[in-house]
Amino acid sequence: MKAPSHLKRVIVDFKKLNNDILDLLVTKYPDGYEDRHIVSFKNAQNELIECVEVRTEDTLYLVKISKRLVDAMDDHDVDDEDEDEDDANYDDDEKDVELPEEQ
């Protein structure tokens, strides 16, 4: 798939991965990525680079894949679920309290 020419292209290493890009990855690949999602190319040093692609309105991110990326995606997905559970539990803990009437 060719990227539209107006998109800025950014290669992101695992070490520089921020939560916004991690959110995009987990949203696009909720069950993980497969071989068909991998984009491969050779860099200036003739090394094979393998990435997965995520896009925003103005940027195409190629995120280098590694075991650490998979772990980060798994952990990020679990963290989001924990936050959702915390939010849900917070609502359950609220109780209606009747205040005494002022005289």
Image (tube, rainbow, N blue to C red):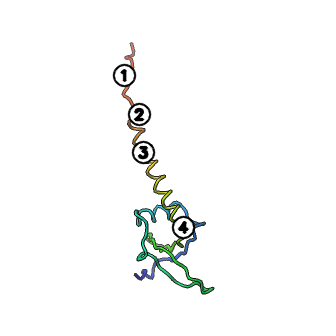
Name the residue rendered at 41%, 33% in the picture: 93
Task: Tell me, yes or no, whether the two marked residues, 4 and 2, touch with CB atoms within 8 Å.
Answer: no
Q: Which mark is residue 98?
A: 1
Q: Quadrant of residue 31?
A: bottom left
- The percent position of residue 63, horizontal first and vertical second, equals 52, 72
**Within-10-Å neighbours for mark 2: few <14, some 14–19, many 20+:** few
Say the numbered circle drawn on residue 67: 4
Q: Which mark is residue 85?
A: 3
First of labels 4, 2 by sequence position: 4
Relative to 15, 40 lies left or right: left
Q: As drawn, is 69 to the left or to the right of 32?
A: right
Residue at 45%, 82% in the rendered image? 5
The residue closer to the viewer here, 1 or 29, is 29
Tell me which corner region of the image, top left, top right, bottom left or bottom right, holds residue 56. Answer: bottom left
Q: What amino acid type should be assigned to the residue bearing mark 4? A: Lys
Q: Amino acid at mark 2?
A: Asp
Disc on the earlier residue, 3 or 4: 4
Q: Position of residue 26 (x, y in %)?
A: 44, 62
Which label's residue is closer to the chain start, 1 or 3? 3
